[in-house]
Image (spheres, grey):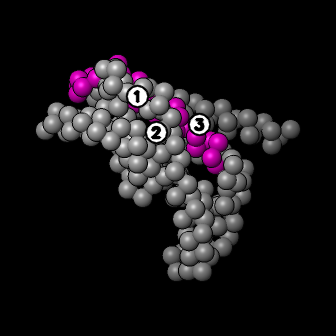
Amino acid sequence: MLAELAQWLVEMVLGYGYFGIYVLMSIESSFIPFPSEIVLIPAGYLASQGQMDMTLIVAVSLAGSLTGAFINYYLAFFIGRTFLERYGKFFFISQSALDKMDKYFDKHGHISTFIGRLIPGIRQLISIPAGLAKMNINVFALYSALGALIWSIVLVVIGYAVGENEELIKTYLHQITLATIGVLVVLGGVYYLLQRRRAKA
């Protein structure tokens, strides 16, 4: 079953090319989240076969990820914020809670966005609180791009290295995910310590 799915994805990516990767990554980063590895690992495999270019795969993946991120950001910015300001009290979300969120994203939004883009299951959702808090769009775009770029490169390289071998993909993807989360914990700790030291200065 998995082998058939992998083969179907390889054929689909090959059939639609870079535009297909862009569309799928746009969807993946917005309103219909699904694992980005099912798009980029087959694309990396095709690159290993000389049928696609790794640089272009990463570029269109990044463009698609940002498109999806902006969709969620602006939906939350224009629709979600207005809705919560008007009806949030019925969901136990007060104006003071929104103000605290604004202050948090104003101070820590860059690191939250960057780290969030690297965590599976959260990477698609981090755009929503950023939009609700009206985070600076340029800062949001920069750190979203950095996180999405790293994640895209990791998945494409895995696909390039292990190809259609499902067991290797499972092993490497699991290890990469754990390593990424470990690095993020360390970065978060360093950031927290720096913020505390700056506050005491």
Q: Earlier in the sequence, mark 3 or mark 2?
A: 2
Residue denoted by label 1: 156
Disc 2: CA contacts within 10 A as few (<14), some (14-19) or many (>=20)? many
- The residue drawn where x is 71% and y is 58% is 103
Residue type beneath disc 2: Ser
Reply yes or no: does residue 199 show up in magenta. Answer: no
Residue denoted by label 2: 61
Secondary structure found at label 2: helix
Reply yes or no: does residue 154 show up in magenta. Answer: yes
Residue 96 figure quarter: bottom right
Nearest the eye: 56 or 95: 56
Residue type beneath disc 1: Val
Q: Mark 3 to mark 2: distance in Å?
A: 12 Å
Q: Earlier in the sequence, mark 3 or mark 1?
A: 3
Query: Looking at the image, can residue 198 be seen?
Result: yes
Marks 2,1: beta carbons within 8 A: yes
Disc 3: CA contacts within 10 A as few (<14), some (14-19) or many (>=20)? some
Residue denoted by label 3: 146
Secondary structure found at label 3: helix
Magenta part mainly helix, strand or loop? helix
- The residue drawn where x is 66% and y is 61% is 134
Segment tinted magenta in the rendering: 140-168
Image quadrant occupied by the C terminus: top right
**Horizontal side of residue 16 vs 179, given as left or right:** left
